[in-house]
Amino acid sequence: MSWKPHVTVAAVIEHEGRFLLVEEETPDGIRLNQPAGHLEKDETLIEGVCREVWEETAYRFEPHGLLGVYHWRHPQQKLTYLRFAFVGEVTGHDPARPLDVGILRTVWLSPAEIRAAQDRHRSPQVLKCVEHYLAGQRFPLSMVTHL
């Protein structure tokens, strides 16, 4: 049996000092996360992150850069996640669009509110991505090559 990590894409979206997060149902209870999800067959990383933001938040997302690549192993589920996190901006919103199954709502939180809610984060990647964003970490989209 071969081992494969779960490849995910995530969007770190900041507007006026607040970050767009989703409140979602998980096997561990209701958790906060960046708009994120699994990369689907035959889509690029960029297509995947734009799709996930749309499905989970009803916002259109325009990526401007790569924030980083994050490797995390879930301690209880024994699953390994490889997250490609992108930064960018929202370019439109459809408040009438239903959110993806399991997404309860979207929230815009300040860094202080995100730090205060660490016990509700889906994974440690949530705060790490915000910290890297606040530290100015950015890589050009050209770092991601789709062949």
Image (cartoon, rainbow, N blue to C red):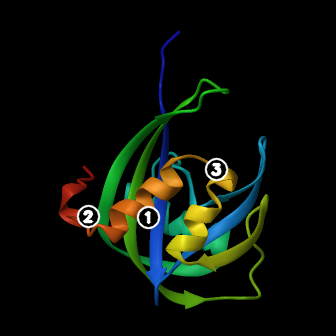
- Residue at 74% from the left image edge and 81% from the top image edge: 97
Q: Secondary structure at mark 2?
A: loop
Q: Secondary structure at mark 1?
A: helix
Question: Of label 3 and label 1, which has the lower sequence position?
Answer: 3
Mark carried by residue 38: none
Mark carried by residue 137: 2
Q: Quadrant of residue 70?
A: top left
- Given residues 100 and 27, the one toward you in this image is 27
- Given residues 73 and 93, the one toward you in this image is 73
Mark carried by residue 122: 3
- Given residues 113 and 32, the one toward you in this image is 113
Residue type at the position of mark 3: Arg
Residue denoted by label 1: 130
Within-10-Å neighbours for mark 2: few <14, some 14–19, many 20+? some
- Given residues 108 and 2, the one toward you in this image is 108
- Residue at 29% from the left image edge and 67% from the top image edge: 135
